[in-house]
Image (cartoon, helix red, strand yellow):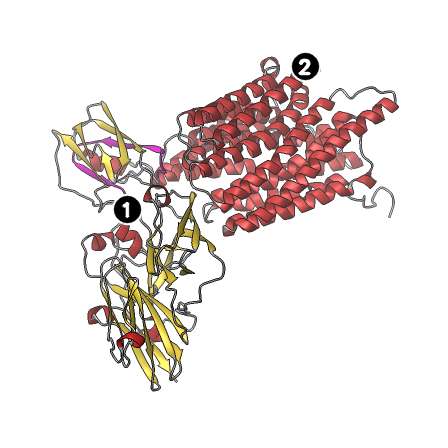
Amino acid sequence: MNARTAKRPRSWHQRAGLPVRIWMVLLIVVGVMHWALPDARWLLVHMFTIGLVANSILVWSQTLGERFLGYHLPETRRRPHLIRIYVLNLGLLVTIAGMQTVLWWLTTIGAVLIGLMVAWHAVALALLIGEAQRHRVTAGEGRAENALSVWFFVASASLLPVGAGVGAALAYGFGDPLQAGLVVTHQAVNLLGFLGLAAAGVLLIMFPRLLGETTVPLRRRPAALGVLVAGIAVICGGALADRPVVAAVGVGVYTAGWLVVAAPFVPAIVRRPPRTYASASITAALMWLIGTLVWYAVVLVSGPFVQDRLSLLTIGFLAGFAAQLLFGVMSHLLPTMMGGGEVTAAGKAEMDRWWLWRVLVINGGLLLWLLPMSSWVKVALSSLVMLAFIVFLPIMIRSAVVALRVRRGETAAPSPRTPQPGLQAVAAASAIGLVLAFGVAMGGTSPGAQQDAAAGVTPTGQTTTVDVDAVGMRFTPETITVPAGNRLVIRVTNRDTMVHDLVLETGEQSGRLSPGDSATLDVGVVGRSVEGWCSIVGHRQQGMVLHIRAEGGTDDGARGSGGHHGGPSATPPTVDLMADPGDGFRARDPRLAPAPGGTVHRFTFEATEDVGEIAPGVRQTLWTYNGTVMGPTLRGRLGDVFEITLVNRGTMSHSVDFHAGMVSPDENMRDIGPGESLVYRFRAEHTGIWLYHCATAPMPVHLAAGMFGAVVIDPPDLAPVSAEYLFTQSEWYLGGDGEPIDADKVAAGGVPDLVMFNGYANQYMHRPLRARVGDRVRMWVLDAGPNEPLSFHVIGTQFDTVYKEGAYLLRPDRDGPGGSQVLDLAAAQGGFVEMTFPEPGTYTILNHRMVDGDRGAMGTIVVE
């Protein structure tokens, strides 16, 4: 093997950059699959920010810092930097795992690792500045011209540990406005600070030269750094003090800092318009940055801090600014790392393949995505933008391969063969047009829908535009009158605290709207009456109906013929309670564990919506706490404190109401939208078994769909027993197979299709409980409702102890030989009974309101 073909050892830069390449590949995989993955948007954001961006900043700030200082560390001193990189990635993985599992302590461990490694990096950079200056003075070279820019990197790295701490606090969970204020602080420190300051330090030196300028405005650097840091400090202070206007002023100060940075770029761009992917992508990134900051200031100054409103920063800052900046900088820097002269030229030529098409598709797609459009149009646009970002990877690989061949002398530098700008612009416009057409065809307004609304009326050529607000389970106005023949455009805004949408029988729909969101529906020409409603289960039954009346038109009587509105859209599945659920079925364990030690008990509840089984072969869409009909059972003693972090992983608003607590409903029981969280804290003031449930309207629908559970607070004189069991009765009103509960049946107080113990009909008939002769058994019983009463009975034995709603009705040490046959409970009542089994046999547990026992409220206990 000669020197030409010998395998060269991997440089420290290659080893340090390995995580960057891994995160990029993972980001692409998740990006391709993002519409099929739950929480994909959340995952993409964090993989990009704490995966790709954090690694890139640590690698490039070290590389560029040495270049700016004119002082390169020897390979023998690279080990600490590699340790920082790999421990940082361990922390990133732990943090993502903690956030995905909503384990705040795991997130905290990851945040500590990240904070320590980046703080170490900040100290190392500061020491490097001093070492480089001493070396240059000793060598008679004077001070490094660009040393001041490295302080941007030091400031950037110094802020991330603060952001990591705020992230850990967010994972722990606090109530608004503190939680929302922490979100703003987290964004300011991590996005505007860690990412923004590093970007400013790089661009002050690199971007003018990339545009062909030979001079760099040195005098602007200290002013820019000071103004940027001051802006971040004001934002954080205003956010934590719940002063949106102060935070908005901070955004203004921060924006002024970036204007100081970017001002010299403007004349350079005017003189030399971007002609490469790097210069065009960075220019577009800067425009998105300034625009997003102005937008963000308006959002903040219009207050209050609400987490859904604050998410507006994500698209503009991350996709528009951060991603375009990162790929633009990498397009310029990566070829320069391969060598100089022809090597760099060859690499850059490959990096610029189809550069204009990529820039136009990314920016045009993002701008259109921000407009109010149907969800299918947004899906199509975001997929196209994702593709334009993803092609960077194969282009980068090809660039590296070509540059390597040129460096080895295996080939001459190839001539660039990228299509002409005019052709690329036409191709970009065509691609955007095609995805728009696809999105409209899949879910937008169709010609058939417009013709259906027109009902043959002659168009007038005029347009009626109406603003409709969704608030308080109503559309306001709830009736729209439009002259027959006019085109109707509806601008719907969700001014409520929960998620809503608007669906018209003609097919138009707004998509889910979080609080503060808006959408525009183009109904087309209207010639007859049209009905609309909120399609979230139960909301239509609560009165969220919109009536469109055509003045002077025809009315063919069509009502509600299209769209899913929360009632059954198919025949309910057939129920066979005698059928065996299968060998793989595991009944919910009804055994009640003793109260845990300590006086403070912390739990995390995740509100979810997913399909599951509630009887053999009967699948419905379940709304749950932590994935099961009937959430976790909590237990404690008098005076214990319970702290529950509720995280909404669903698609609509949810909440929780603990009957065991005596707290103001205003804050603790408020609705939270998808992705939001709150902390509910209460002290157990009284003993008994207490219901908790979702309190979001329509409350009986949310409760019946699975969002309930039990809290047991032990009486102080609770006697020891052989075993304790918990039975919570609930009802189900079947919708179509795999669909949500039938809200119409619930609202009408109709007959339930199933009555169940612990979330599955007759599960303890198929999987009996076990006991021994002479065992004393306590059975805690709760009627979750929402409607049916419970007459709890165990065939073959009698109760010698009965406890109901906080008081003993029967005790053997007090009432002698007296006994009881049932524990009667209305909805939301609870208690317990105790019994012994004198003989072996199979004893049946049931609701002795026999019709409900036959609907699934039945089980057995085998005594041996």
Where the C terminus falls, by quadrant?
bottom left
Say which amino acid is labelled 1: Ala
In percent of width and height, residue 603 lies at: 46, 54
Q: Label 2's element?
A: loop
User: Is 514 covered by the magenta stretch?
Assistant: yes
Is any part of residue 35 visible from this angle?
A: yes
In percent of width and height, residue 385 lies at: 50, 35
Q: Please tell me how many numbered marks the rendered image carries.
A: 2
In percent of width and height, residue 58 lies at: 67, 36
Q: Which mark is residue 805?
A: none
Dot 2, crowdedness within 10 Å: few (<14), some or many (≥20)?
few
Residue at x 46% of width, y 37% of height? 178
User: Is 331 covered by the magenta stretch?
Assistant: no
Q: Which residues are magenta?
A: 513-537
Front-lying residue, 239 or 478: 239
In percent of width and height, residue 697 lies at: 28, 46
Q: Quadrant of residue 479?
A: top left
Query: Can you name the residue that lies furthest to the front here?
Result: 814
Dot 1, crowdedness within 10 Å: few (<14), some or many (≥20)?
many
Vertical relation: 729 (above or below) 270 = below
- The answer to whether 775 appears left or right of 423 in the picture is left
Residue at x 35% of width, y 50% of height? 656
Vertical relation: 349 (above or below) 170 = above
Residue at x 28% of width, y 50% of height? 699
The residue that label 1 is drawn on is: 697
The residue that label 2 is drawn on is: 219
Vertical relation: 72 (above or below) 847 = above
Say which amino acid is labelled 2: Arg
- The answer to whether 350 appears left or right of 501 in the picture is right
